[in-house]
Image (cartoon, coloured by chain):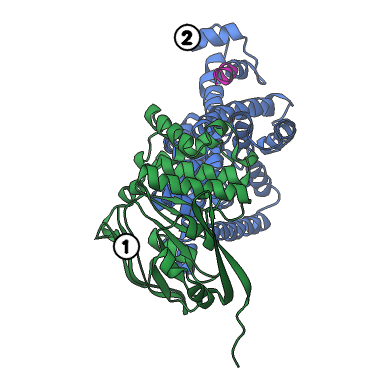
Amino acid sequence: MKFEVKNASFSFGSEQVFRNVSMTAEKGRIVSVLGPNGAGKTTLLRCMLGFLKPDQGEILIDGKPKAQISNTEFWKKTAYVPQARMQSFPYSVEETVLMGRSPYLSIFRMPSENDRKIAEKAMEMAGILHLRNKNCARISGGELQLTLIARALAQQPEMLVMDEPETGLDFRNQLIVIGLIEKLCREDGLSIIFNTHYPEHAFGISHDTLLLKADGTALFGNTSEILTPENMRDAFGVEIRMVSQTVDGRNVSSIIPVGLVQKEN
Amino acid sequence: MTVTAVLIVFSAAAALCMGQFRIPLDKVIAELTGRGSDMANAHTVLFQIRIPRILLSMLAGAGLAVSGAAFQSLFSNPMATPDTLGTANGASFGAALGILLGFGAFRVQLTALVFGISAVMLVFAVTRSASGQSSPSMIMVILGGMVISSLFSALTTLIKFVADPQDVLPVITFWLMGSFSSTTQKSFLYGSPLIIAGTAVICLLRYRLNALSLSEDEARSLGVNLPLVRGLVIASASAVTASVVAMCGVIGWVGLLVPHIARMVLGNDNSRVVPASVTFGALFMLVVDTIARCAASSEIPVSVLTAVIGAPVFILLLRRSGGIGR
């Protein structure tokens, strides 16, 4: 599935959040979305998914305007992974993952045995099968995030859209989530768009990057071409040094924020 | 579930025997199986009074409990009750108005029903015009419900204020406390279809209630048709609540308490909570109403008993489960 945003602009009332943003998520590729707080990362994601309507511009799915695709069709192809938050009525992990089958069920239907098998497979893919009977209120933040990813996988989508999937997790859990995203793309051929506050993660796994700037404009292209110290200085207002080292034959890039950009005059 | 069913049958049998006019169990069975008994008035008491009343109390309990469960999921809020959108206060006002105007029992019930339904429609009219959008946010709807609810409650107070304190005011006051005593075959036949229909729709929607209880974006991303499902839930729960209040007055606690009891026993999955609310609600209301009419020489208001019996049961369960299902 190919997901395109063409010249999208969005404002809350008179306040413009972003303008003329374009990007493409090709099949089997990972796109990271970076930008400072308030640059509209989450707003853009919500526009892509149809939760908000952009003022201008188009969202195209395989070249077809999103408006022409029914909601149920869309949510069978695209799954959304929200930031992990406590549920008001905490369900068990298995019940939560099973809800991913909802787009396939007509309004009065209950999930079938087959839906349960698919949910089980999704839990296995996310590595949380051993938690299936636990209550979501009694698992860690990392486990809850993996549960939400499993729920999205139960939708059997071609594309995952994730809102800061590793925010609020410790180092180890961040690497688990990032590793899972990379594996889902490489082994299962999923396309993935994810928002992140961590340039390292974008460097680590994404093919393409959309960098949103505080002034509402954006840059899009290959991750290595977009995430240069100059561009990041421009977007975040922070002086950056980049350090690359080879660990076990793998190139690991780190970004060191060295200080705020001093305003001229 | 089987245990609850057995308990319901057992309690219903006891309820048929008990009351100011005692009928031994063998006579009840003889009457029910159509063989008739030699006991004077037994047939009339059973078929004209007790059976409609027992059926209505069970229906009301089941309906209120299911509506409560549905509203709690709809608003993602454990404190939501079937009255959240002003239905109960609207219906109370209708009934008080009917009594003030000197209507007969049946027309009072009809007025209550009409005002109960209008209250919810008014909530939607208010929130729609206020937000200027086609689908108002749930917070707006809750606030709208509170506003309309207090408006009708104020109007009810106004009616009580102008009502004759000698004869009309006590009738209104007693009616508002809730009672199944005015149940007749006729009111049962007119009131029950809405309760049954509303309860049935919510039962059919039970799996959707899980996704509905998540955040709005999440519910949408699971393919839930929000306007449709929300509309169905609100229409069904309001129809149930308005009918119950119209026939039996205001019965608090059941809609809040019974779904939570179901959750504490079975977990939060609505595909189990909703059917359990039906049976627990029916059993609870049946037991409470039987006590209400048998415990003292005159009837005890049902809403007093639901709280007096409900609160300790609820606290006990809360302490045992820690508040979270399983």
Residue corresponding to mark 1 = A4
x, y percent for residue B48: 52, 23
User: Which residues fall within the magenta stretch?
Assistant: B1-9
Q: Chain of mark 1?
A: A
Mark toward the viewer: 2 or 1 = 1
Q: Is residue B274 visible?
A: yes
Amino acid at circle 1: Glu
The tally of labels here is 2
Q: For the residue carrying disc 1, how many other residues have a C-alpha within 10 Å: few (<14), some (14-19), or many (20+)?
A: many
Q: Chain of mark 2?
A: B
Q: CA distance from mark 2 to mark 1?
A: 71 Å
In the image, residue B42 lies in the stretch drawn in magenta: no
Q: Report which quarter residue B7 is drawn in.
A: top right
- The chain that appears green in the image is A
x, y percent for residue B172: 64, 47
> Residue, x 38% and y 37% (percent of image)?
A108
The front one of A257 and B212 is A257
Check the image and report above or below for B34 versus B130: above
User: Residue B33, which numbered label?
Assistant: 2
